[in-house]
Image (spheres, rainbow, N blue to C red):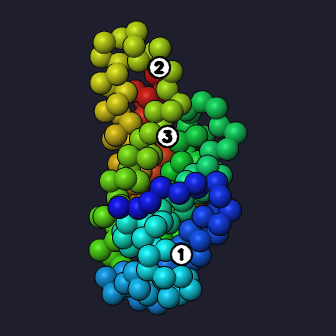
Amino acid sequence: MTIKKNEADPRVIRTRRLLQDAFASLIQEKDFESITVRDIAERATVNRATFYAHFVDKFEILEARLMESFMTIINRRISGHEVLNEETIQSIFLGICEFHKGLSTMCKRRNTSLVPVFEIQIKEKIQTILLSYIDKDKMLSNPNAQFLINTASIMLSWGMYGAAYVWNKEGCLISAESFVKQSLPLVMNGAKELLG
C-alpha cells in the first residue's frame, strides 16, 4: 500500500517524475514482464522503499504513465470544445489514434500483454469524457434517456477505441486524419443518441 504524500510537494512531484522517467526508459529497452521494481528504483537513483512510497507496484506506475499520456493528448485535442458534436467526437477519435500510435512508440518492444490490462480503464475514461458533455437535466427528464445515453456512450467509446487499436495494429496504413474521416460516418451513426 502506498503512503499518501502531499502530491503538491515539489519533492514528491520530482521523485514521482524520476520514477516515471526511469520506467519510460526501461519500457523501451525491456519487456514489461522483465522489468522489476529494483530496475526502476536503480534507474531513478532511489531506493525501493522510496518507490513503494509512491507506487504499489510496477502496474501502478504503468497505469499512471498511460493515463497521464492519454489525458494529455485528449485534453489538448478537446481544448475549447464546449458541446458534444461531430467536431468534438472527431477530436476525441483522433486523440485515441494518437494515443495508440504513441503507445507503440513508448513500448518499442513487443509489450502486447499490456494492452488488455489497461484497455478497460481507457475505454471508461473515454465514456466519462463523452458523458461530461451531456446535459444532466436532459437525462433526468426522460426515464429512458439515462439508459440510452449511457449505452450509446459505452458503444461509442468502445467502438472508437477498438477501431483506433486495429488501425494502429495493422500498421497505420493511412494517416489518422484519413482513417478518422473515413470512419466518422459510422461513428456518428452510433452517436445519434448522445447528440440528441
Q: Which mark is residue 130?
A: none
- Residue type beneath disc 2: Lys
* Callout 3 amino acid: Ile
Residue 191, compared with residue 168, is above or below; it is: above
Of labels 3 and 2, earlier in sequence is 3
Identify the residue at horizontal 62%, vertical 64% (top origin).
13
Disc nearer the start of the sequence (1/2): 1
Which of the two marks, 1 or 2, is nearer to us in this view? 1
Q: Quick one: 42 or 186, which is closer to the camera?
A: 42
Which mark, by number, is residue 19? 1
Residue 8: x %, y % from top left: 64, 54
Q: CA distance from mark 3 to mark 1?
A: 28 Å
Q: Secondary structure at mark 1?
A: helix
Label 3 secondary element = helix
Is the C-beta separation of discs 3 and 2 under 8 Å?
no
Residue at which label 2 appears: 136
Decide if residue 178 is on the left or right side of residue 30: right
Residue 3 in percent (x, y) is at 44, 60
| CA distance separating discs 3 and 2 | 14 Å
Question: Residue sitting at 55 percent across and 62 percent down?
Answer: 69
* Image location (x, y in percent) of residue 137: 47, 14
Decide which of 127, 30 is in the foreground and name it: 30
Question: Could you give the CA–CA distance between mark 1 and mark 2, rounded to whole angstroms?
Answer: 40 Å
Residue 82, image quadrant: top right
Where is mark 3, residue-wise?
129
Amino acid under disc 1 = Leu
Q: Residue furthest top?
A: 141
Res 128 quadrant in image? top left
On the question of residue 161 being in view, the answer is yes
115 relative to 66 in the view: left or right: left
Q: Residue at x 44, y 29 (%)?
A: 194
Numbered-mark total:
3
